[in-house]
Image (spheres, grey):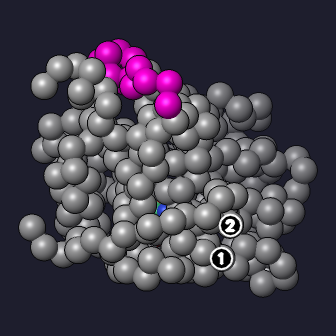
Amino acid sequence: MTRADKADRAIGIFDSGVGGLTVLKRIAQRLPHEHLCYLGDTARVPYGTKSADTVIRYARSCAARLTERGIKLLVVACNTASAYALETLSSELPVPVIGVVEPGAREAVRRSRNGRIGVIGTTGTVASGAYARAISALNSDIRVYSKACPLFVPLAEEGWTRGELPRSVARTYLAGFSARRIDTLVLGCTHYPLLRGPIAAVAGPGVLLVDSARETEKAVEAVLREQGLLRAASTPGRHQFLVSDAPATFARVGARFLGHPLTGVEWVDVQTG
Ligand code: DGL
């Protein structure tokens, strides 16, 4: 296969559900000529309450479904899977693998002025300590305060992202942060940017919300450029959406978030193979 043929292959992206679309959107804006193949493992969402072994098993099967379609790079657009499975996937797959925890940590460290950072994420991501480790590897003087917010994921999957209910859930989860005097809050779950409105309203204007998508898109471009795998064609890239359950719900919530209809969302079996 020539390098041009390889460059013409899609970037694979997966998450447990709609959350990774927050990463896909940024990659699509930065690299509009790239083909993107997205897999939402909606049959097994949420990942955030599952054990590390289970998340690794799920991540392996999602990665297998995407690599068998011939992707050139894999983005693990899920913090829980990045926290638990990034090393495994990187060592097993024939393509470069990019996670979202390290990029999110980098962005937070770059943006915080007072060195007091809050992290919200799934139960698994918070329990793994992945953000605290990544932040302290970049700057060991920074104080990190974490809180698991598991109810945000089903709210985002249902598209229940505005109004009093998500705001009240946010108020309950974020209450402890005000005494910590954080100036930066990491949305350490790719579903949470869908709830940016209520989270920002509760966190207040003095707290900057950071998500991993911006740094992740840069990392994707850098790796493709370095390997000579940026797609050269000037035609827009194709976007393909795969789910392991309930394509209609995914299409409804995804279309609202991406601002255009998602046609032909395809079901795939993630359990076999
Ligand atoms: N969006 C994912 C994350 O970033 C997973 C959420 C979940 O399935 O619990 O962690």
Q: Nearer the viewer, residue 202 or 144?
A: 202
Q: Is residue 236 above or below residue 202?
A: above
**Residue count near mark 1 (Cα–Cα under 10 Å), binned few <14, some 14–19, many ≥20:** some
Q: Main secondary structure of the magenta part?
A: loop
The residue to which callout 1 is attached is: 159
> Image quadrant for the N terminus?
top left
- Check disc 1 and report its element: helix, strand or loop: loop
Position of residue 111 in the picture relative to residue 270 (left or right): right
| Beta carbon at label 2 within 8 Å of ligand 1 | no
Amino acid type at circle 1 is Gly
Q: Could you say which disc has been placed on residue 223 in the image?
A: none
Q: Nearer the viewer, residue 122 or 247?
A: 247
Q: Nearer the viewer, mark 2 or mark 1?
A: 2
> Image quadrant for the C terminus?
bottom left
In percent of width and height, residue 49 lies at 41, 76
The magenta stretch is 224-235
Q: How many marks?
A: 2
Q: Is residue 256 above or below residue 27?
A: below
Q: Residue at x 55, y 64 (%)?
A: 262
In percent of width and height, residue 106 lies at 55, 32
Q: Residue at x 61, y 37 (%)?
A: 29
